[in-house]
Amino acid sequence: MKILLKWKIWRIEAGLKGLLKQKSIKPYVWSFGAYYIDPKHLVFVVGVPLDSERERLKSDIDFNNDMGQLLVTYNWPFEARKHVLFDIESQETVDRENNGNWWYHYK
């Protein structure tokens, strides 16, 4: 099961990158969490260079719906879907708040 979930995560990350490329944004996409303990413990991070890009994506209802739809497309466990988080953050914010260190930003 753990390997199957990891494969689904890779597919969802690839899907996120595809969504961002459609918007002409250089994608930084990754995930973290204890999904192997429970599939609901998962966060996908969409990193963008600028605060303005982050705000544009956060306010884009279609983009946010498309992100959530990836969980359906790649058959993430149904009961866990409502708990999985998609966070959009900018390198500008991480630079300003955490000296550019993404790990500290999410710690």
Image (cartoon, rainbow, N blue to C red):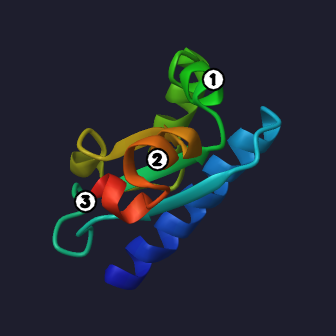
Give the numbered dot on residue 94.
Answer: 2
Residue 44 x/y as whole percent: 43, 52
Observer-nearest of 59 and 52: 52
Quadrant of residue 36 within the rendered picture: bottom left
**Res 13 quadrant in image:** bottom right
Please give the label number shown on residue 107: 3
Image quadrant occupied by the N terminus: bottom left
Vertical arrangement, residue 66 with respect to residue 99, above or below: above
Amino acid under disc 2: Val
Above or below, comparing residue 61 to residue 78 in the picture: above
**Residue 79 horizontal side relative to residue 5, left or right:** left
Residue at 27 percent of width and 67 percent of height: 35
Q: Give the percent coordinates (x, y) of residue 95.
A: 51, 48
Determine contact: label 1, label 3, CB under 8 Å. no
Percent from the top left, x then y, of residue 68? 46, 37
Residue that appears at 49% across and 40% down: 89
Residue type beneath disc 1: Ser
Question: Picture coordinates of residue 5 (x, y %)?
Answer: 39, 72
Return the disc, 2 or 3, that comes first in the chain's sequence: 2
Camera-near label (1 vs 2) is: 2
Label 3 amino acid? Lys
Q: Which residue is mark 1?
A: 52
Q: Earlier in the sequence, mark 1 or mark 2?
A: 1
